[in-house]
Amino acid sequence: MYLVPDLLEEIFLGLPLRSVVKFRTVSKQWRSILESLRFAERRRMMNAQTKTKIMAAGDRSRTQTCFKEDEEVEIVYLQCDVASRPSLSCDGLVCIPVPGWVNVFNPSTEELLRFSSGRDPPIPRYANNYVDCVFDVFPGYWRMGFGRDNVSGSYKIVRMGFNHHWEIHRCEILDVNIGRWQKLSPPPYEIGYRRKSTCVNGSIYWVEVLPDQKLLALDLHAQEWRDVGLPLEALGKSFQVANLENRLALAATYIENDHWNVKIWSVEAPEETWSMIYSIRLFPLDHPYDDPSSPLWYWTRPVAVSKKGNLFVQRQLQEVVQMLPRDG
């Protein structure tokens, strides 16, 4: 029985991701529909919710939240076996690497895809167990990235491994629709393993702070690396990179007048100029939020902005999501 392509597309839109991947092999017509950018965009828009949702790992009863309820924002608590592990997210999908496997989880449909990642490299000598318990460190100290190719619509996973001599020994990329790791040209320099990456408009961004502060990007479709210039005011400060309202954002924390402060810059495209969108005084150095065992550094990562203009951020150690008023 022949079905017109538009009717097939409507049927496919109701299928789970696992079936979409499987049905690509049925025929050339089905593959053409399922791999089209139009289908990927329609499927992504169907999964989008009018109410902003922030995903958090852990038990709701044991997770502390430091904001008043906002009717436009909902906290969704993931309680699967691997939810508390370091993870990456893009368009509501969560990528959770574990020893030997990489999981891609869709909380909306409860679908879970697993991809073998092989044997992880041994823990490097420069590992610092105390510091690493604070940061998101992936198994085998892989440098990881997860994002969406804006041209093909496919979600892709990137991983890099460095040896004891700071030389890269593996650099690979996996298309979730294909499920097979392929070699990727290595980055021009080592990427730090203690900071998360983020995906914005088809590129994944990583922060490197030693020996120089750098922001490195990988175009997921062209598979090309490029350096991104940083705002001058962020240099010399501890910063995190994030996707904030589909724009690349940079959050720098610093001490000024005996207080922790955070400034957040945003840019529409890498070739454009950074603009500061928030400047917020957090709390004094002797505030209970500060960790007395590590008083020299602190970080926050922007998560979302509500329609009321409230900024939600994640801060270190307690993995708490806060709401802060717009300050600038």
Image (cartoon, helix red, strand yellow):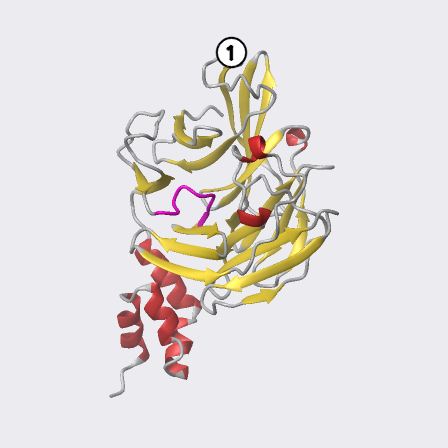
Name the residue at 41% across, 32% down: 312
x and y, in percent, of residue 143 in the image: 59, 49
93 within the magenta span: no
Task: Say above or below: 251 vs 168.
Answer: above
* Front one among 27 and 131: 131
Q: Is there any visible trace of residue 254 in the rendered image?
A: yes
Task: Say above or below: 125 vs 328.
Answer: below
Q: Is there any visible trace of residue 91 in the rendered image?
A: no
Task: Say above or below: 109 vs 264.
Answer: below
On the rendered image, what quadrant is the N terminus found in?
A: bottom left
Name the residue at 60% across, 61% down: 172
* Front one among 101 and 5: 101
Name the residue at 37% across, 39% down: 56
Residue 73 as seen in the image, left or right of residue 282: left
Dot 1: what SS?
loop
Name the quadrant containing residue 306: top left
* Front one among 88 and 214: 88
- Which residue in the structure is indicated by mark 1? 286
The residue range painted magenta reads: 81-89
Give the residue type that dot 1 points to.
Asp
x and y, in percent, of residue 167 in the image: 73, 51
Q: Main secondary structure of the magenta part?
A: loop
x and y, in percent, of residue 188 in the image: 72, 52
* Residue at the far bottom in the pictured view: 1
x and y, in percent, of residue 99 in the image: 50, 52
